[in-house]
């Protein structure tokens, strides 16, 4: 039987009170894509002109080890 994939998640707010330019969002998402992140959800933050972006990627053994180390 195949082992199930474990995921790590990332949540980040993009934008400012002055708004969010499409180019800035696109640049951020392209950077994330290069690092293996896949956007799974977005949420506009009310009247703040900001957007929450939620992404996931497979959890690697390296990240598991880093998380298990004491701070």
Image: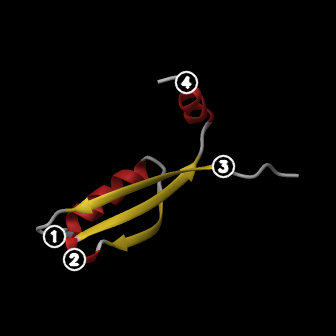
Which residue is depicted at the point 41% across and 49% down? 34
Q: Residues within 10 Å of mark 4 (few under 14, many from 20)?
A: few
Residue 4, labelled with which disc?
none
Q: Residues within 10 Å of mark 1 (few under 14, many from 20)?
A: few
Of pointers 2 and 4, the one earlier in the residue sequence = 2
Q: Which picture quadrant has residue 60?
A: top right
Which of the two marks, 3 or 4, is nearer to us in this view?
Answer: 4
Label 3 – label 4 distance at C-alpha: 19 Å
Label 2 – label 1 distance at C-alpha: 10 Å
**Left or right for 18, reference 70:** left
Label 2 – label 4 distance at C-alpha: 40 Å
Of pointers 3 and 2, the one earlier in the residue sequence = 3
Marks 2/4 in contact by CB < 8 Å: the verdict is no
Q: Residues within 10 Å of mark 2 (few under 14, many from 20)?
A: few
Q: Is residue 7 above or below residue 18?
A: above
Residue 6, labelled with which disc?
3
Residue that mark 4 sits on: 69
Residue that mark 1 sits on: 19
Marks 3/2 in contact by CB < 8 Å: the verdict is no
Label 3 – label 2 distance at C-alpha: 35 Å
Q: How far from the left and from the top, in percent, is residue 45?
A: 30, 71
């Amino acid at each position: 039987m195949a082992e199930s994939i474990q995921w790590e998640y990332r949540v980040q707010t993009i934008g400012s009170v002055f708004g969010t330019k499409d180019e800035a969002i696109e640049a951020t998402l392209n950077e994330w894509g290069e690092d293996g992140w896949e956007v799974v959800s977005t949420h506009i933050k009310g009247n703040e002109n900001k957007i929450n972006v939620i992404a996931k990627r497979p959890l690697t053994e390296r990240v598991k080890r880093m998380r298990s180390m004491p701070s």
